[in-house]
Image (cartoon, grey):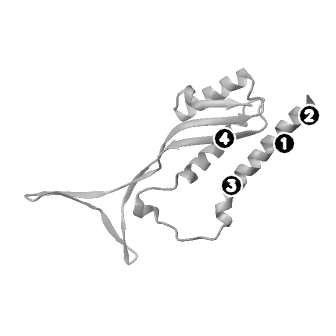
Amino acid sequence: MRLVEAIKKWWLAGAAVLGVVLILLPRFLPDGEKESTEDTGQTDPSYYSSILEEKIRQLILRVKGIEEAAVLLTLDGSSELVYAQNSSVSEDGRTEDYLVIQEDGGERTVLLSEIYPRIRGVAIVCTGGDDVQIQKKITELLSASLGIPSNRITVAG
């Protein structure tokens, strides 16, 4: 029995290390042509999801009985940037232009807000995840903190 528990711990540790390597790998690769997020009106969803996954993992590790955890988060779409606009109505119709301000010898649009994508679901693999009580604690914790229904949260050991 101890061998099986040891294998599970090594597997979880390996999965966690692999996750960290996959998150950090782009930082060590050479930079290619980077697209501006302001031009497309959207930001990188993988950055947003990786931050949320780490926050969820840290929260779960505080639950009694959990020593290790891996988190997978799925999102609907990507972030959207909302810019200020000028609207004018004339006899020819209605026109809308982005509000542009002069700054340091250049121009830039005025960003009003960023709308983050909705969370589609969360999958958790953690020590003790096979225990019904721990599954219930984690599901209730994530449902309340993320504002998603419990049927979109899965916990396994």
Q: Earlier in the sequence, mark 2 or mark 3?
A: 2
- Label 3 belongs to which residue? 22
Q: Quadrant of the C terminus?
A: top right
Q: CA distance from mark 2 to mark 3?
A: 28 Å
Q: CA distance from mark 2 to mark 1?
A: 11 Å
Q: Which mark is residue 71?
A: 4
Q: CA distance from mark 2 to mark 4?
A: 25 Å
Q: Nearer the viewer, residue 156 or 127?
A: 156
- Label 2 belongs to which residue? 3
Instruction: Indicate the amino acid at tag 1.
Output: Trp
Binning the other alpha carbons within 10 Å of mark 4 as few (below 14), some (14 to 19) or many (20 upward) gives many
Instruction: Indicate the amino acid at tag 2.
Output: Leu
Q: CA distance from mark 3 to mark 1?
A: 18 Å
CB-based contact (under 8 Å), mark 3 and mark 1: no
Instruction: Indicate the amino acid at tag 3.
Output: Leu
At a point 63% along the width and 36% down the height, the residue shown is 123
Q: Which mark is residue 39?
A: none
Quarter location, residue 70: top right
Image vertical order of residue 19 relative to residue 150, above or below: below
Q: Judge depth for marks 4 and 3 and give the one in front.
A: 3
At a point 32% along the width and 57% down the height, the residue shown is 84
Q: Which mark is residue 10?
A: 1
Q: Earlier in the sequence, mark 4 or mark 3?
A: 3
Q: Nearer the viewer, residue 62 or 51?
A: 51
Q: Earlier in the sequence, mark 3 or mark 1?
A: 1
Position in image of residue 140 (x %, y %) = 61, 26
Instruction: Indicate the amino acid at tag 4.
Output: Val
